[in-house]
Image: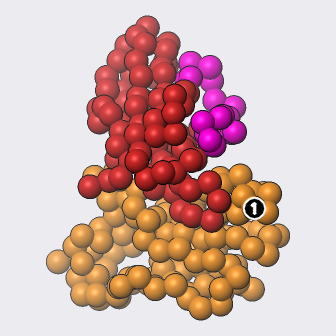
Chain colours: A orange, B red
Amino acid sequence: AQTVTQSQPEMSVQEAETVTLSCTYDTSENNYYLFWYKQPPSRQMILVIRQEAYKQQNATENRFSVNFQKAAKSFSLKISDSQLGDTAMYFCAFMKPFTQGGSEKLVFGKGTKLTVNP
Amino acid sequence: DTEVTQTPKHLVMGMTNKKSLKCEQHMGHRAMYWYKQKAKKPPELMFVYSYEKLSINESVPSRFSPECPNSSLLNLHLHALQPEDSALYLCASSHRQGTQPQHFGDGTRLSIL
């Protein structure tokens, strides 16, 4: 069974600075998908970024980028130029593709609570 | 604005009541999901519907009864709930190919008295 570990329960950063959230996972699969979701106090789960395991290039989405290290099974999220609106719970998630016997079941980490301070 | 709409946003009910949670999406997604989320915890999968058929039931108690009347709607019928069932209930949807991320609604905050 796949597991996802987020070792930082809470983090804080000053506005406009850069912060990195860590995520490691355990799987024997070769092809899979990794996601970062953001859940602000308004409670909606919002997709931040997605990475396909077969792509070596790290995904980027505006101020958000990942450092995907497949061999190390590491998937960290870097937030540049942090904004107050980035304050939220961040969940790392793993998914095995349905086309390879997966069930589209997302396996979540326990989350990292990020606070951006003014 | 979210593309997955959940109603109601808040629900308070007694243990003997019967109520339903509703979820609607118009993105053409053919997979829909119910999650339960306790405070400061990640979402826990409850049910998955694929092409309007139940494909995953994560051993959820029978007091929770899902229903998918069509490809756009997903209901969760509640009956005889316990106080420990108080939580945020999230609905999500995705394309069936299994390569697309899930899109979540705002959730229903459920409190059992």
First to last magenta residue range? B47-65
B22 with respect to A67 (left or right):
left
Work out whether B81 lies above or below A78: above
- Is residue A2 in view? no
- Callout 1 environment at 10 Å: few (<14), some (14 to 19), or many (20+)? few
Determine the residue located farthest toward the top in the rendered image. B16
Which one is in front, B57 or A83?
B57
Residue A17 placement: quadrant: bottom left
What residue would you read off at disc 1? Answer: A99
Determine the residue located farthest toward the left in the rendered image. A118
Q: Residue flagged by tag 1: what amino acid is it? A: Thr
Identify the residue shown where x is 31% and y is 26%: B11
Identify the residue shown where x is 54% and y is 44%: B32
Q: Can you give x and y, in whole percent of width and height, for residue B38 in the image?
A: 46, 42
Which one is in front, A102 or A3?
A102
Identify the residue shown where x is 79% and y is 63%: A100
Residue B29 magenta: no
Determine the residue located farthest toward the right in the rendered image. A28
Task: Identify the image quadrant of the N terminus of chain B.
Answer: bottom left
Identify the residue shown where x is 36% and y is 69%: A114
Q: Can you give x and y, in whole percent of width and height, for residue B73 in the image?
A: 46, 35
Q: Can you give x and y, in whole percent of width and height, for residue B43 in the image?
A: 52, 48
Work out whether A15 lies above or below A40: below
